[in-house]
Image: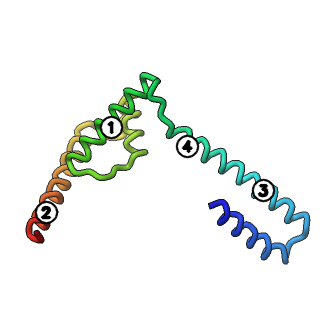
Amino acid sequence: MKKSILIITTLFLGFSGLAQKKKDLIKEVANLKAQKTELQAKLTAFEKAKEVNLKDSLQNFSYAFGVSIGNNLKTIGFDSIAYNTFSVAIEDAIKGNEKIPLQMHNASYKQLFKKRRRLRRKRKVRKAINF
């Protein structure tokens, strides 16, 4: 990844250097270094946010609860969800700031659950036929 960024940056600087003055190139390099530092800081913050400290009681509970929900979702046929949206929904519900009414949520959930169940049944039938 770093090599790719370095190669792209080098090529960019090489071609743009033909039309730019030396001062402009120095400014561009400084801007690229600043962007690199900013992106590195964002990456570090993102990686740190994913760290789990199971010795902390709230994080331990949260992780265990998440594992339970994940296993339940897997059991009913889900192999993926929109994790960020799921996290926002939990936070909104705890704070009482739901973006959709509970009745609408229940209808949406039931409809999606039925669709998933039909798809699972179709897969089982296909596997049985192909067996």
Sequence-first disc among 2 and 1: 1
Sequence-first disc among 4 and 1: 4
Give the camera-side residue of 6 and 42. 6
Sequence-first disc among 2 and 4: 4
User: Does residue 65 sit above or below 114 in this rendering?
Assistant: above
Among all residues in the image, which is located at the extreme top? 57
Residue position marked by numbered label 1 in the rendering: 67
User: Does residue 75 sit above or below 118 in this rendering?
Assistant: above
| Label pair 2/3, CB-CB below 8 angstroms | no
The amino acid marked with disc number 1 is Val
The amino acid marked with disc number 3 is Asn
Sequence-first disc among 2 and 3: 3
Q: Which mark is residue 122?
A: 2
Q: Which mark is residue 31?
A: 3
Which SS class for mark 2? helix
User: Does residue 1 sit above or below 39 in this rendering?
Assistant: below
The amino acid marked with disc number 4 is Glu
Mark nearest the camera among 1 and 3 is: 1
